[in-house]
Amino acid sequence: MPPITQAGPYPPGPAEPVDMRRMRRDPLAFVTGMNRRYGDITSHEGDGERVFMLHRPELARHILKDNVANYTKANTPDDAMLRPLLGNGLLTSDGEEWAKQRKLCAPAFRRSAVTSFDGIITEETQALLDRWRPTLGAGAPLPVEHHLTSLTLAILTRAVLGVDLGSAGEGFGRAVDAANRFMGHYVPDPDPDPQDTALRRQGYVQARMFLQLVTRTVIAARRSVGGGGQAGHGHGEAGTGSLMDAMLDGLDDTGLRDQVLTLIMAGHETTAKALTWTLYLLDRHPQEADKVREEVDRVLGDRTPTAADLSDLPRCRRAVEEAMRLYPPVWLISRRATGPDTIAGHHVPAGTLVCVSQWVLHRHPDYWERPEAYVPDRFDGAALPSHLYLPFGGGERACIGRHLALVEAVLVLAMLIRSVRLELEPGFVVEPEALVTLRPRHGMRMTARTR
Ligand code: HEM
């Protein structure tokens, strides 16, 4: 890296503008390097603007909680990427509009409400296990990351829309995939083949039209049978209490469409990544896998789990929590200062882009013992410093789906562990790739065998 800037109004950082093409080749090394080399609060020039990065929990807390009123999501890189598809839903709105939406949606996402989706979760997981069955004896490797993404999409579509899309579900899945592929990179790398970029963009535009059409159709069908007004109770399926139902009365059709797509896009890939990394880490740490297996066998035997079992599956939960520490599906949070501020003695001009990286905080050697090690027991209930562990973000804009995500991840994990033994294909290279979510660069190929 270039020399440290000593003078000037900005926090320390490279004196020269950062070569963003190089940075995007390994953003994780970049954010870690900024912290290690320049300290707790750093700044650099990238994409033509000055960017601040905060590398301590109390500084993260400052922008996410203590002085949250001075920070907006508007005009951040996330916003620019998400808004064309998600419009003005919970993830992308701000201010009063966001507060209104959050209040409307919150009851449906309470822990006590989302546990009622346990049946959908276990049914869909069983369907995946059934699809795997013919391959179990053969030991053929499966594209596990891909399968888990389809699984979490199927679960979330049913939970949000209240209907099983049936054969249209496949088209829906493909369209979500195309949209994800296009949006996966904050700024698409200049493609060696411009025709390829054009094709991907075209695929994205078509996918967006298809997703909006399907969503509008489901909304119209739901409205025509007079649903709605059930926020906070009566959740289940078959149109009698989906997440969407809770919002039918509070949003117009466009608002509802944006919200439905927001929930589906924000909720499925993240959860799939959490599960993928958990399975990977359990494979690499057989002793931890044994502890989880022992718990699942003892609590469930041959039984399918329900939400009532969740409190008896703490090892499953910790396995996921520790996986999200090491491999946070969302690895970067960005905000823009609306007015001037002071952080750790540094002046923050209005309009500055300010970022916090979970990748850095979750592996910060000042806060974690053996930060690189997979130790699920560190989540045994001991309190962590505020805003150190942020897989779901923090403050008022923390993830609304966090309870659902954990219920889902624990139930899916328990069912997989109960039925099969998953092992990484020998020689398969796993390395994290930081796109919008943190994914394994080459996917995750694992063999599944009957236990
Ligand atoms: C393991 C799974 C998940 C992870 C790691 C995750 C992570 C996050 C993070 C870090 C944020 C905050 C972003 C920021 O502050 O800029 C967030 C927000 C959000 N998440 Fe999740 N999420 C997960 C699952 C879900 C699920 C299942 C849903 C919905 C069904 C969901 C819906 C949302 C929404 C709507 C927001 C915006 C909330 C707001 O601004 O009020 N997420 N998520």
Image: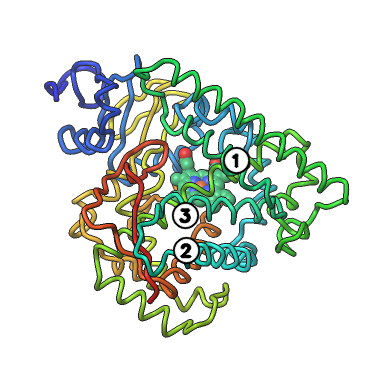
Query: N-terminal of the two: label 1 or label 2?
Result: 2
Disc 1 designates what residue? 262
Q: Which mark is residue 60?
A: none
Disc 3 designates what residue? 148
In the picture, the quarter occupied by the N terminus is top left
In the picture, the quarter occupied by the C terminus is bottom left
Residue 388 in the image, given as x and y percentages of width and height: 33, 51
- Label 3 secondary element: helix
Marks 3/2: CA distance?
12 Å
Image-quadrant location for residue 172: top right
Q: Closer to us: mark 1 or mark 2? A: 2
User: Mark 2 belongs to which amino acid?
Assistant: Trp
User: On the rendered structure, is 214 left or right of 36?
Assistant: right
Residue 127 in the image, given as x and y percentages of width and height: 56, 64
Between residues 18 and 147, which one lies in front from this camera angle? Answer: 147
User: Mark 1 belongs to which amino acid?
Assistant: Thr
Q: Closer to us: mark 3 or mark 2? A: 2
The residue carrying pointer 1 sits among few (fewer than 14), some (14 to 19) or many (20 or more) residues within 10 Å by Cα, namely: many
Between residues 191 and 380, which one lies in front from this camera angle? Answer: 191
Residue 365 in the image, given as x and y percentages of width and height: 19, 51
Marks 1/2: CA distance?
30 Å
Compared to residue 141, the image places residue 359 above or below, namely: above
Query: N-terminal of the two: label 3 or label 1?
Result: 3
